[in-house]
Image (cartoon, rainbow, N blue to C red):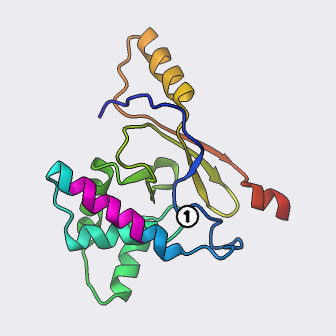
Amino acid sequence: MPVAPLSPSPHVHAGPSHAGPSHAHGGHDHKACVGDALARAHSLCEARGARLTTLRERVLELVWSSHRPRGAYAILEEMAVDGKRVAPLTVYRALDFLVEQGLVHRIESLNAYVGCPEPGQAHAGQFLVCERCGDATELNEPAVTNAITNGAAARGFRVLRQTVEVLGLCPACQSAA
C-alpha cells in the first residue's frame, strides 16, 4: 500500500494516550480507549465493505488492551484464558487483516502489534520504542516520510510500505533512572 504524506499532526501514542501499565495512569479510563478503537474499526470496516468478525474484533481489543506492543502468542494465550481455543494461524490471519485495514501496526523489530490511533488516514509507521518498559509511541511526521520516499526515489527505488523504529527511553523511564 503506498504511503501518502499527511498534514502535520501531534505526536500520538500507538496505544491509548496514557502511560503504560508500569507507569501511573492518572485516572485514565482505559476501557474508553478500547471502546473508541472498536467503534472506529466497525465504522471503517463497514465503509470499506470489510468484514470485522467477532474473532478479529477480539484480537483488536486485545492489541488495544495494552500500551505495549503485543505479540501474536501473547494474544493467543489471552484468548485461551477467555475459554476460546484458537489456532496460532487464526490469530496471525486476524492480525494480517487488521494491518491491511490500517487498524494496527506491526512493530517489526519486536514482532508485535500496536493499535493505530488514526486508522482512517494513510500514513507511514514511525515509532519510538522504549527499551526499558516496552511502551511504543507512534509519530506521524510527514518530513520523515517524505525524506525516505524522496531518498528512495532518487535511487530508483519505489517505496511500498515504511516502518521506522527508534529505540530509546521514554520520559518516565528516563525519570526513573
Q: Give 148 or 72, whichever is nearer the viewer.
A: 148
Residue sitting at 43 percent across and 34 percent down? 162
Q: Give 157 or 9, whichever is nearer the viewer.
A: 9
> Which SS type dominates the magenta stretch?
helix
Rendered view: 137 above or below 89: above
Q: Where is residue 131 in the image (x, y as percent from the top left)?
A: 67, 56
Q: Position of residue 109 (x, y in %)?
A: 52, 49
Q: Quadrant of the C terminus?
A: bottom right
Rendered view: 49 above or below 54: above
Q: Where is residue 175 in the image (x, y as percent from the top left)?
A: 84, 60
Q: Name the amino acid, label 1.
A: Arg
Q: In this view, does 100 lie to the left or right of 115?
A: left
Rendered view: 146 above or below 85: above
Q: Quadrant of the N terminus?
A: top left
- State the extent of the magenta-drawn residues as a range: 35-45
Q: Is residue 60 visible?
A: yes
Q: How many labels does the image show?
A: 1
Q: Where is residue 85 in the image (x, y as percent from the top left)?
A: 26, 83
Residue 42 painted magenta: yes
Q: Give 68 or 80, whichever is nearer the viewer.
A: 68
Residue sitting at 26 percent across and 67 percent down? 56
Residue 38 painted magenta: yes
Q: Badge 1: few (under 14), some or many (20 or more) residues near its Cα, within 10 Å?
A: many
Residue sitting at 28 percent across and 50 percent down? 101
Q: Is residue 73 visible?
A: no
Q: Which secondary structure lies at badge 1?
A: loop
Residue linked to disc 1: 68
Residue sitting at 59 percent across and 52 percent down? 137
